[in-house]
Image (spheres, grey):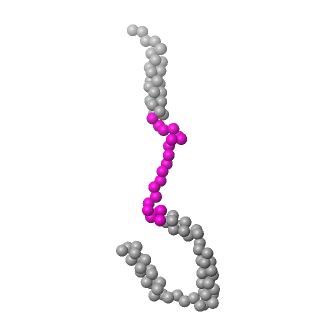
């Protein structure tokens, strides 16, 4: 039996061809970069927060006057805080949140 140097080269060529075919099949199965898309779905709470944020950007016209009046009352010690009303609103908002 005669062993020549061409046998290892033949084996290497066949092996390299198999690897090349696997790589080509993998590349063909992937989508091109322009077809890949990302998507995102926001929860209902996030959508609500986005609406609130957008509404806050559009400040009502009389809001500046209202804030200026409160500032002036605070500076002249004429602004009175009703602790009972604040407590009722706090408890009401907590009850709304937790049922």
For residue 82, above or below residue 45: below
Which residue is more in the foreground, 87 or 70?
70
Give the quadrant of the C terminus: bottom left
Q: Position of residue 10 (x, y in %)?
A: 46, 17
Which residue is more in the foreground, 68 or 30?
68
Give the quadrant of the N terminus: top left
Judge from the rendering whether residue 91 lies leftward or rightward of residue 74; answer left or right. Answer: left
> Magenta stretch: residue 38 in it?
yes
Q: Residue at x 44, y 64 (%)?
A: 45
Magenta stretch in the rendered image? 29-48
Q: Residue at x 45, y 55 (%)?
A: 41
Q: Position of residue 89 (x, y in %)?
A: 45, 81
For residue 25, above or below residue 43: above
Q: Residue at x 53, y 40 (%)?
A: 33
For residue 50, above or below residue 19: below
Judge from the rendering whether residue 57 lies leftward or rightward of residue 27; answer left or right. Answer: right
Question: Which residue is outermost to the front?
Answer: 61
Q: Position of residue 17 (x, y in %)?
A: 46, 24
Which residue is more in the foreground, 29 or 56?
56
């Amino acid at each position: 039996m005669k062993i020549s140097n061409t046998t290892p080269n033949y084996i290497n060529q066949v092996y390299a061809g198999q690897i090349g075919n696997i790589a080509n099949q993998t590349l063909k199965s992937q989508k091109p970069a322009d077809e890949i898309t990302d998507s995102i779905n926001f929860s209902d709470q996030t959508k609500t927060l986005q609406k609130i944020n957008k509404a806050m950007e559009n400040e009502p016209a009389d809001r500046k006057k209202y804030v200026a009046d409160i500032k002036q009352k605070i500076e002249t010690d004429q602004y009175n805080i009703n602790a009972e009303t604040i407590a009722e609103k706090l408890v009401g908002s907590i009850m709304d949140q937790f049922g």
